[in-house]
Amino acid sequence: MAVSLIEKYRNGCRPTNPRLPIVHIFCFSQASCSEAKCELQKRNMTENGLGHRVLNMDTMNPNVKRVEYAVRGPIVQRAMQIEKELKEGVKKPFTEVIKANIGDAHAMGQKPITFLRQVVALCAYPDLLEDDKFPEDAKNRARRILQACGGGSIGAYSASPGIEIIRQDVAKYIEKRDGGIPSNPDNIYLSTGASDAIVTMLKLLTSGEGKNRTGVMISIPQYPLYSAALAELAAVQVSYYLDEDKCWSLDVGELRRAVKVAREHCNPRALCIINPGNPTGQVQSRQCIEDVIRFAAEEHLFLMADEVYQDNVYAEGCQFHSFKKVLFEMGPEYSSVVELASFHSTSKCFMGECGFRGGYMEVVNMDPEVKLQLTKLVSVRLCPPIPGQALLDLVVNPPQPDEPSYATFIKERTANLDILAEKAKMTEQVLNTVPGIHCNPVQGAMYTFPRLSLPEKAINAAKEKGQAPDMFYCMKLLEETGICLVPGSGFGQRDGTYHFRMTILPATEKLKVVLKKIREFHKRFTEEFS
Amino acid sequence: KPNMTENGFGHRERVLNVDTINPNVKRVEYAVRGPIVQRAMQIEKELKEGVKKPFTEVIKANIGDAHAMGQKPITFFRQVIALCVYPDLLEDDKFPEDAKNRARRILQACGGGSLGAYSASPGIEVIRQDVAKYIEKRDGGIPSNPDNIYLSTGASDAIVTMLKLLTSGEGKTRTGVMISIPQYPLYSAALAELAAVQVSYYLDEDKCWSLDVNELRRAVKAAREHCNPRALCIINPGNPTGQVQSRQCIEDVIRFAAEEHLFLMADEVYQDNVYTEGCQFHSFKKVLFEMGSEYSSVVELASFHSTSKCYMGECGFRGGYMEVINMDPEVKLQLTKLVSVRLCPSIPGQAMLDLVVNPPQPDEPSYATFIKERTANLHILSEKAKMTEQVLNTVPGIHCNPVQGAMYTFPRLTLPEKAINAAKEKEQAPDMFYCMKLLEETGICLVPGSGFGQRDGTYHFRMTILPGTEKLKIVLEKIGEFHKLFTEEFS
């Protein structure tokens, strides 16, 4: 039975080395065995030199072995392999691999926002400040950023929480977005993408042993950065299910169930929520956000609000409400006690600047001593990339109506968001015409997470292969159509349900073709395994 | 489980407080941006607000940040980056053709032709290939496989990733990692955060901070009593000490690592910063392979490099890479999986790294300017290294080893007994006490030796040689004067 290398390392099994005495293999697995240590010290080199490596599957960090990240997992590796084969002229039923696995807008053809790139170019090569081709407002932004850089260069390290004027600009952006609720720049930490700040917070929160070990509540389905980080930190993942039958909304009853069960075996300290949601695309109602805040206060949980898709809201009647804003509108009974960290990024929304790794978090009601620890922790990595900080500055401080670049800026921004909204609708519509695929409205974000009805025979075929059924489905789809999606098992889902996550990012015409091919594939698949 | 008080949830402990926070994080220290730097920033603010002080500016000689201290970027690098960021500039006559070609090549390797797309998690493939070619060229043709190259967000990122992979075990089998005293405190910070065991080996101050294998043996033997030493970290050229290890020493370390079954981590971010006659940079990879297959087929090695130092000083771009040698293939899969969670290193940083490893060639238009800028930067650093050593050694009570390489001096201070006692009363390390006073009286910000590690009863500071030459002269003069005053005050 062919077991993938992935499955092998997941199970922690290794081939035995016949060249080494059995005692070495046995002892390597018994980390607490003092004999093993003795043997390690006396280990002789074998004739050809290569004994047991120092760093092998038994000696490496066990937490790292538990980490999974499906967005770039086995199916994506296979997709890349197929791309290479296509380049080498191998014949396939398709001419290109369509990577609808990752929220990368530029990779799928979205163009950068002109103003943002002009300013960053001016910062990178300030000689261009003499160049007439650049508008004056872009030059002013660049000068302002450069003045805040050591030696006037984006090559200098910045303060570890980020360049101060950029943190001030972020605070102003938040105030404006949240109807004037004050934001203190000292509570803003710039980061290398939102992922960096999320991992930093989870790291701070992880403590305790055994039943006192930190538990972190995260939605099912979730963006697998969270499960990966929790595995690496050996914190306890406490799953709460979003309600697929109600557009993936969050039910506080489910939160209560989850935390109650969790308290038996861990110490729940945090609650993570992604809004707008990834992979599900739901935009939580204001009522729901209030309920979550109230729940976090009652259960004494640190709230982590991942809001990187805050501009990506498409459905009528849906609106983005920041957790910060709702928290403060609920009055001091909550706003003076609930500990909150909110995250944003340059990777999504209308700009899609993933490669710049720009992001920030705002911490609210953080213990002052903990904040000192946070500041100390981020100082070890010196600072987030300056080009990313500069780009973030332009995202939170874009051209204003009275500025020369405004017209182009607003046109580009609006076009990007409009196109995403159209593709969100189209995706939902087309997929819902396929018998056996059910797609909730894509209210926001950049993904669809439709539910698949899979025939019993297919489920069994998958099990024989040692594969999750939706992985089996997606692999077959990849091999037959070149379309790369991520199986729902990579994000979490209710037992016995199957999904995939597809981005809505391919250009409209290509997306139409993709949706058509998925429909055709699903029909074939259902027939083949009926 | 706290009860709600009458006014709601007030008067209760925060969820995240000093008792519930990750205890490993509390153990982390990073002196390079520690308390003295925070005080320096505060003083800068006070100066801006018009507070009167015995000086008009704070001189930050605490951190290896060349651009912050006035060094200019390499023109070609910034041209190519600008072209990548805003490809409309490819139509602009002001840019030389070789810069445009580099930019086009990088953009073609980016998703959608944009720096804004994620790359493959180990980095853009064509750049990894360029890094491999750079290594081959540097190491006299010894092959480098791009699949063994992982780009990273500065060298720090890759170093932490390797330490993370290496950390396992409990109690007496907990991973021990050998690191020099003095060391660059990223290592001690990472080990504290990972709750791995720091195994210190002392560099020999009386022999120009060189490494003695006997000291390695002493350290590892003592360590085996209480942990499981799995790795040996070495920084060459050294930070903070500036020594450039001899080839013999590098061979000795490799042999030691093989004998003691240790994973070698070679931090080589200062590889172009070599100043002293008779000193030369030898990469661990090259020496390993020149020692023959008995070693080169077994010793596990990770070598690290960065865009932050050398002649380019592009700290803010956070560019870097590591090359792994003889890594277990299954561990390598794990490494690839681990870096995928953070998606990819910053693309501008990857692009910058590409230019560092693939600079203008002699037959290209930009070569003349490039080589002039590169040579000037390294030359100026070399002069400042010499000047620093000379001047500091004229001060009674300061002894400065030759600054053979890197960007720092780590002179030893003779402190009067009274000063040491005054420091202890303030619960400060004596060299922190000294450096704080220096800061308050002169505006010069250095980092006390206690932040890097030093032999008990010895005191040092680390100063960068990065301020502009004229400013550095003044800094050195002021330090000399301060030391005299300090010694008199506490005599």
Image (tube, coloured by chain):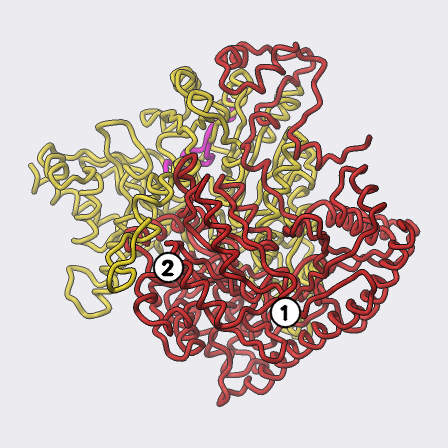
Chain colours: A red, B yellow
- The secondary structure that most of the magenta stretch takes on is loop
Disc 1 element? loop
In this view of the protein, which residue sits in the foreground, A127 or A114?
A: A114
What amino acid is labelled 1 in the image? Answer: Phe
Q: In this view, does A493 lie above or below B95?
A: above
Which contiguous range is marked in magenta? Answer: B234-248
Residue A321: % across, % down:
48, 73
Q: Which chain carries label 1?
A: B
Q: In which quarter of the image is residue B23?
A: top left
Given residues B283 and B224, the one toward you in this image is: B224
- The residue that disc 2 covers is A297
Q: Is residue B183 left or right of residue B113?
A: left
- For the point 60% across and 79% down, the residue is A413
Q: Quadrant of the C terminus of chain B?
A: top left
Query: Neighbour class for label 2 at 10 Å: few (<14), some, many (≥20)?
Result: many
Q: Mark 1 points at which residue?
A: B95
Res. A274 image quadrant: bottom right
A518 vs B131, left or right, is right
Name which residue lies at 38% across and 61% down: A363
B238 inside magenta stretch? yes
The chain to which mark 2 is attached is A
Distance (Cα) linking label 1 and label 2: 58 Å
Q: Which of B403 and B162 is in front in this view?
A: B162
Residue pictured at 18% horizontal, 40% vertical:
B428
Q: Which of A245 and A213 is in front in this view?
A: A245
Dot 2 amino acid type: Ala
Give how far across and how far down residue A525 sits, in percent. 87, 54
